Amino acid sequence: MQCPNCDFQLPYKLCNQCGKPNPENHKFCGFCGSKIIVRQAQNESGNAPKERLACSDGMCIGIIGEGNKCTTCGKPYSGPAL
């Protein structure tokens, strides 16, 4: 979504009803008036992003998945059991 005055790219979310873009902080659609419902994204294991556990290897961008191993590098998780 672009600012109509300066063309700056603004963060937005799409209306669940009409699909039009709305500023990120809107609770109701400015086009159709419907309540905007935000659904949390989930990772491969079905956990919401807040529940993800990052790989302990400082150079890896993976997350801990099944078997308590990193989904990217395979390094085992050494913290408390998941």
Image (spheres, rainbow, N blue to C red):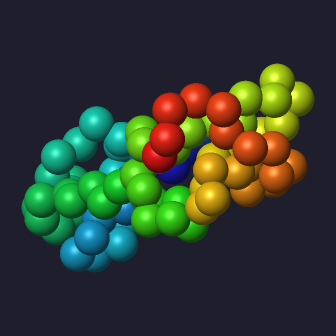
Extreme residue toward the top, this view: 58
Vertical side of 36 occupied by 80: above or below:
above
Q: In the figure, is residue 37 to the left or right of 61?
A: left
Q: Position of residue 63 (x, y in %)?
A: 66, 46
Q: Which residue is more in the foreground, 76 or 23?
A: 76
- The total number of labels drawn is 0
Residue 67: image location, x then y, percent: 63, 59
Q: Of residues 54 and 69, which is closer to you in this image?
A: 69
Q: In this view, does 43 lie to the left or right of 65?
A: left
Q: Residue at x 60, y 61 (%)?
A: 66
- The answer, for residue 7, to whether it is visible in the render is no
Residue located 23% across and 75% down the image = 17
The residue shown at (42%, 43%) is 51
Which one is in front, 45 or 75? 75
Q: Is residue 42 left or right of residue 78?
A: left
Q: Residue furthest bottom?
A: 18
Q: Position of residue 46 (x, y in %)?
A: 44, 65
Residue 22 visible from this viewpoint: yes
Picture coordinates of residue 56, whole percent (x, y): 73, 29
Residue 58: image quadrant is top right
31 on left or right of 13: left
Residue drawn at x 47%, y 46% is 82
